[in-house]
Amino acid sequence: MKHHALLGAETPENSHYQNMRLCFELLSAAKMIDLSCAQRLAPYQLSESRFVLLFLLQSEPTGLAPHLLAERAGITRATLTGLLDGLERDGFILRNHSQTDRRSILITLTDKGSETAASLVSDHTQWIASLMAPLDNQEKQLLSTLLTKIWTTAQKDINNGKNAR
């Protein structure tokens, strides 16, 4: 893990390096969570993206139009198409024509998809709780506040088109 490796490097004790170190710590923790999540989902032939789609569809028994599913998942329609192809091939979802407009498609879970989503949402919730267990409520609130500040600053950079110099 590249960010974790960088944490071991000797760096001068000044605020710029301290900021970089904090950023690497955050990225390293995020990468470890991603790896753990991938390992937990692999036995179900699911990626985190595919799991998110099952999670979103679980609360929509009548289904969702692909464009709404992409929007809620925060992905492009092109990315969604590939994910849906795999989920359909593996028996998790169905593509159905809308009863009101035959040109429209609705994505619904199969029985396998519903059962898997229900089981994984419960397991995932417990796993995430275990990740946060070492933190008390005040620390959780502080972490949330700090992460929101960092996210907001990064989002502003993206919106302003700032690039590396």
Image (cartoon, grey):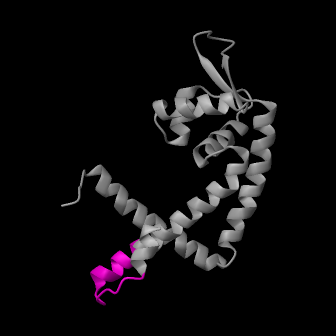
Check residue 22 for magenta coloring: yes
Q: Nearer the viewer, residue 56 or 131?
A: 131
**Is residue 14 found left or right of 125 in the rendered image?**
left
**Is residue 32 found left or right of 92 in the rendered image?**
left
Residue 145 in picture, x, y percent from top left: 50, 70
The region drawn magenta spans 8-23
Check residue 111 for magenta coloring: no
Residue displayed at 42% across by 61% down: 151
Q: Nearer the viewer, residue 24 or 130?
A: 24
**Is residue 10 found left or right of 67 in the rendered image?**
left
Q: Is residue 24 above or below residue 78?
A: below
Residue 111 in picture, x, y percent from top left: 81, 32
Residue 156 in picture, x, y percent from top left: 32, 56
Please say whether residue 84 is visible from this viewpoint: yes
For the C terminus, the image quarter is: bottom left
Residue displayed at 48% across by 30% down: 77
Q: Nearer the viewer, residue 142 or 38?
A: 38
Residue displayed at 75% across by 62% down: 126
Please say whether residue 59 is visible from this viewpoint: no
Q: Is residue 155 above or below residue 63?
A: below
Q: Residue furthest left?
A: 165
Q: Is residue 86 above or below residue 100?
A: below
Q: Which quadrant of the structure image shows residue 138?
A: bottom right
**Is residue 66 found left or right of 21 in the rendered image?**
right
Residue 108 in picture, x, y percent from top left: 70, 28
Q: Residue furthest bottom?
A: 13
Residue displayed at 79% across by 45% down: 118
Q: How many marks?
A: 0
